[in-house]
Image: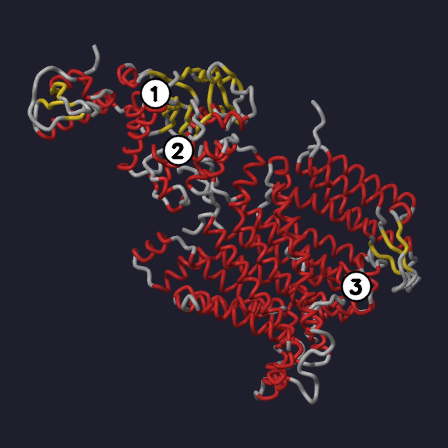
Amino acid sequence: MIEIDGITKRYDDNTVVNNVTMTIEPRTVTVIVGTSGSGKTTLLRMINRLVEPTSGTIRLDGEDNHTMPGYELRRRIGYAIQGHGLFPHRTVAQNIATVPVLLGWDRARIDAKVAELLALFQLDPTLFAARFPHELSGGQQQRVGVARALAAEPNVLLMDEPFGALDPIIRAKAQADLLDIQRLLKTTIVLVTHDMDEAFHLADKIAVMDKGELVQYGAPAELVKNPATEFVETLIGASERPFRLLSIETAGEAVEPGTADGKPLPEATSQRDALSEMLWTGRHALPVAAADGRILGRVTLEGLTRRAAKPQ
Amino acid sequence: MRAWVPPILRAVLLAVLIAFLVSPGWFSPLLKPLVQDNAPAIYNQGSLLTLTLLHLRIVAIATAGAIVVAVTLAILVTRPFGAEFLPLSRSLVNVGQTFPPVAVLALAVPALGFGEKPTLVALFLYGLLPIFENTLTGLTTLPVSVMEAARGSGMTERQRLFKVELPLAMPVILAGIRLSVVISLATATIGSTVAAKTLGEVIIAGLQSNNIAFVLQGGLIVGALAVLIYDGLSAIERVLARRAGLFS
Amino acid sequence: MSIRFDKLGVVIALLVAYGALAAPFATFRANRIVPGDAKTILEALPAGAGAALLGVMVAATVVILLKTPTFLRLAAAAASLVAIALFIGMAATHLAPPENAYARVSPASGFWILLFAFALLAADSITRLKPRPVVRVLLLLVTLGGAAVILMSGLWDGLSILKEYAGRADVFWLEAGRHVTLALGSLAASVIVGLPLGILCHRVEPLRDGVLNTLNLIQTIPSIALFGILIAPLGWIAVNVPGAAAIGIRGIGAAPAFVALFLYSLLPVVANTVVGLAGVPREANEAARGIGMTDRQRLFGIELPLAMPVILTGIRIVLVQNIGLATIAALIGGGGFGVFVFQGIGQTAMDLVLLGAVPTVVLAFAAAIVLDSLIEMNVPRRERGRTA
């Protein structure tokens, strides 16, 4: 659990983050969104004390993050950034091993961890361990960046626009991989982005920052249904509202009894994608299949339309 | 040019240089046409090999001192507690470069007397500038995201300096050292005007006795040394830079 | 509020304390070559004057040590520099009466340390104030003007370096003229040849490596050797080419020095022209081509103006380097300030060395400031911003 309590950051007369209080639940994905200059990155960087707050406290699992030197704190918190920030003079394996080496793990444990993470991120250790960052593609570099952040098995992973430098196709894959890994490792993730699609796709909870203030903090559906300010409304986009609602939940959650023709949709497909598929194929309903191929039922155009409507 | 041509040229240059230093008499017929009457074509007031070694020694000592001092200073002014000195150190470097080597050399004589010492001091002071400037450039132009990642993974300031900043800046620092060595090799010849034992002695003897052969052989030995050392250091730099992933 | 010390101030204050209290301010010698007698500030100056100078130093040290406004620090540096400049002249007349033609008084280590310390402070203050280029040139002119006024007033006439000058005033200006002609003339020649050569290298790629490598090789030949080597071909030309001797080409003297400086100058000019042209943004060139500019219009309208700061940087390197290297010309009879330096080394007369070295340094320094200002005026101002 991360408790942010009345945190403020001022540079001279310029207040970048103003009295933000919020609690981040363990094992969830929290996305901080806002325009550039909203203070979202500064807020993130105060959690691992890359920026020292002017006032207020941040507690990790009840412990004030000022009880230890900043560098020790940062070894316990994963940190991944835009453009990956890999050390160009070190191999992929050495990059991933950075924090374990700093923590003084023994060689065998480090090697095992590196191999495990490479496999987890679908990078063949025999091929990639000895390569240098400049020999990788953008998507591979980004994966190594996240692997490095996770190497010391941190409870918390902070990510600053981690997918910002990737092209759309690789970005979608990276986002899906991140969710899989989060479910597997149960890491608490705090992610900063300005991309609302990304926020709705990844977040359990979204925090909206505007001019240094936390203007709304809640579940994605809550933001669509009850935007706290006009800014939140603009950020979500009036014309996007029904689709945002549909993109939060999966087809599996909208299953109705009955049968339908056509190629079954995997249950993890978002309702938005399910709607899109129906509109494109001209059908009123599509079957939904579980991961093992078993047909669970169907989703219907009417059912999704109801779900996308403004809540009464 | 084909890839194998430069290494062969270099090897030939090195072989000729060594042959000339070990047995200058072989080359006497080549230089004979340049001298008048019966003046000697090969420097005869001392061993060329000894002078070359002394020349290299003086450059090596001065450069070693300059590396230690310049790199240390550049590290200090790029740390938070030394940041106040950074703008000043930049302008000092700029001003320092306007001091002609001859002036530095001449002004060191009253304090240190004639001989090797003023030459060492002049070479040291003159060698500081390129190394300091390049180390400063190397340490202040590191990729922001890499430095951010280093802090974010919990490296202490010392760990960041030795494990990230210096290794990444190394190719640029080496380029500064290379420049400094080449300048020192040439400047050391001027040291002979204050009686330092360097290859400048050969050139000055030639100027004084109007013997072009002396001037030419002294100058060419220094030039060959400079080319060979410059090439050698460039090769080391390329290896390091490739390792650091700076050329892809 | 607690008193806060300025870090640089502490360093400078220590230098000032050492220079003013521990090190000798002036050296007195009964004649030109006997060993000197070191005098501290109080010994070198009349009682009241010595105390006054120490007073100025103490006041300046207080300003330096505390975190005071930059303007005040610059003023303290300027006042102190003027004070030591005036008092060193006074020390000369105090230690050696003007009628004693043999005695020599020269500035000693303390003077140089104080000069260095306050120049450092002035440099730091000026760097912090970030004056515009024009203001920097004005500051230079004021400083040089101040020194000229003191020189003309005769206040420094008692100093040994000016006694050396007094004996050879005519030669001094002759050599000064030669020095400047050598440095500026070879610069002009290298720009006239180097700029078109650089443009050619930029346009014709196969030429580039060959030309730059050749020029690089020339740079590795030590200056005194290059000066000497050129004696032979120029001597041959003087004898064998009709009319060559008439326009001043000779084996020894200024001609080989001029050619050597010209050859050294080519590399920075050509290399910077190539780098500057290569650095012109692709989009700018594409746009120029897109709106129908001819090659010539593109060169003069787009490429050269954009490459100008880099080219000027090359010219700055050349000018400063040439002013320094021109001292070597004296070794082959080419004249210049080097005449005094090498004569001084030969006679172990350091005052004579200074007579050659000080004007050389001042000239190089002034050239660097003027050209830096020119370069800055040619760089379009860009807003520097940091993203959050």
Q: Quadrant of residue A188?
A: top left
Which residue matches tag 3? B114
Mark 1 belongs to which amino acid?
Ile
- Residue closest to the eye, C375 or B76: B76
Query: By what rule are the colours in the image chosen?
Result: secondary structure
| Circle 1 residue | A206
Q: Residue C110: percent from the left, percent from the top?
A: 81, 49
> Within 10 Å of the Cα at label 1, are there few (<14), some (14-19), or many (20+) other Cα atoms?
many
Q: State which mark lies toward you, 1 or 2.
A: 2
Q: Are marks 2 and 3 on the same chain?
A: no
Amino acid type, mark 3: Phe
Mark yes or no: residue A21 visible.
Answer: yes
Residue in the foreground of this view, choosing between A304 and A265:
A265
For the residues labelled 2 and 3, the Cα–Cα distance comes to: 63 Å
Q: Quadrant of residue C291?
A: bottom left
Q: Earlier in the sequence, mark 1 or mark 2?
A: 2
| Residue identifier under label 2 | A147
| Residue A308 percent across, percent down from the top left | 19, 18
**Disc 1 element:** strand
Q: Quadrant of residue B16?
A: bottom right
Residue at point 73%, 52% (across, down): C146
Distance of mark 1 from mark 2, alpha carbons? 24 Å
Q: Residue furthest front?
A: A108
Check contact, mark 1 vs mark 3: CB within 8 A: no
View extreme (top): residue? A312
Q: Secondary structure at mark 3?
A: loop
Chain identity of mark 1: A
How dense is the environment of label 2, judged by Cα within 10 Å: few (below 14), some, or many (20 and up)? many
Q: Locate residue A250 relative to residue C92 in the image: left or right.
A: left
Q: Circle 3 marks a residue in which chain?
A: B
**Residue C290: x %, y % from top left:** 29, 56
